[in-house]
Image (cartoon, helix red, strand yellow):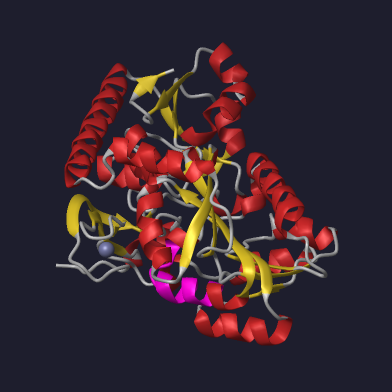
Amino acid sequence: MKKCLICDSLIEPFVSFGRMPIANGFLQADQFQEEYFFELAAGFCPECTMVQLIEQPEPQKMFHENYAFYSSTSTRMAAHFQELAGRVKDSYMKSKDPFVVEIGSNDGITLRHFAAAGFRHLGVEPSANVAEAARKKGVQTVCQFFDENVAREILGAHGPADVFLGANVMCHISTLHSVVAGIKLLLKPEGVLIFEDPYLGDIIQKTSYDQIYDEHAFYFSLRSLTFLFERHGMEVIDVMPQDVHGGSMRYTVGRKGAHDIAGSVELLRERENALGLHDPATYHRLRENIERSRDELMNLLGKLKKQGSRVAGYGATSKSTTVINYCGITPELVEFIGDTTPIKQGKFSPGMHIPVRPYADFENNHPNFALLFAWNHVAEIMEKERQFLANGGRWIVYVPRVEIL
Ligand SMILES: [Zn+2]
């Protein structure tokens, strides 16, 4: 039995997706032989309610110099982080010569707004290639995994921080206690931590099980985070749902008693009670919904294949890896995945080895059906791809349910 990474109690596994490759491990044909697999399974801690992976690949297998995800390639994400930067500057950067630190700062998508406005800032990014991309934009970045020791170094070199940011990174870190201790050490007494991650409530309500993959060690709720921060003398002071990444939550956290607590926190607490996030039965229901979703998707793809329809994937996303491998979607069912990211083109999807081709291959030779792996951008994509629909093409989505749009 595996112990909870937050409270050391025994966790209860509730779903296994079987043998799984690294979600972002797009690879070349000559790398098929050495591809790395692990068992992807999730569990629930009955004590602190944290949902987490049972087995975690080593971080070095996931975030390396060839890490393919550049935040700024999505215009919607760029707009999202511009809004975040503006809000932080207006509300929390009020001291004399304020200082903002961000972990997992990627290619500087958020910090560049602080750099441009002349604020003291520092990004901490473990992937060398994206850290270099940030530096080229004038964003000060160190290439490291953040922990208590790194926090101490930053404190010594720059002094305490007004704001600590983390977007889609806290849930990646299995050594969360060390990170939170480091954040507390680095923050001024009235400083705040603002972070956002995929929200467990959305995963349960939408059966968006593709959020579950190697990089996400944790699936946060207000309830489980309250337990975590309590141990560090901190508390959640505000929450704000976000519709990026298919349902995220932005949490603002401060030292206990240092800030007023927004009404949104109590409202979310009530929503989580109603959803049953504390109840093991909720997770068994989630597993049943996941199995049903898989069966429906495979029935549909099998039927289309029999009809002789051409199906292509749209968007070689990290989260598609869970769906493709768990369901068993082969290149016979989905002939290729069209993607605009140059680093992925010409490679193959992890595990099932579906070819990833330039977006132009989709545009110039529309399939009959496009399986939308980037379903969280459905509105934006359907708007952009009106010609595909006009040519008789149809979209297949699987969140919140399997259907043809
Ligand atoms: Zn626990």
Q: Is residue 204 above or below residue 223?
A: above
The relative height of residue 353 versus residue 336 in the rendered view (above or below) is below
In-front residue for pair 129/377: 377
Q: Position of residue 142 (x, y in %)?
A: 66, 76
The residue under the point 42% across, 57% down is 29
Question: How many labels sit on residues?
Answer: 0
Q: Is residue 175 magenta?
A: yes
Residue at 48 percent across and 60 percent down: it is 235
Quadrant where the image shows the N terminus: bottom left
For the residue pair 100 and 263, the one nearer the viewer reads as 263
Q: Is residue 240 visible?
A: no
Q: Is residue 366 visible?
A: yes
Where does the image place residue 249, in percent across and percent down from the top left?
49, 46
**Identity of the residue drawn at 58% across and 12% down:** 390
Question: Residue 381 in the image: x percent, y percent?
Answer: 58, 28
Magenta span: helix, strand or loop, mainly? Answer: helix
Q: Which of the two residues, 310 or 294, is positioned nearer the viewer here?
A: 294
273 lies above or below 402: below
Query: What residue is rendered at 75% in x and 66% in y?
Result: 139
Task: Depth check: give the residue in front, 93 or 84.
Answer: 93
Q: Specify the quadrant of the image occupied by residue 309.
A: top left
Q: Say whether residue 381 is magenta.
A: no
The magenta region covers 172-183
Question: In the rendered view of the protein, which quadrant contains the C terminus?
Answer: top left
Across and down, in percent, residue 366 comes to 53, 24
Give the left or right position of residue 311, taking residue 273 as reference.
right
Q: Find ligand 1 in the image and state its quadrant.
A: bottom left
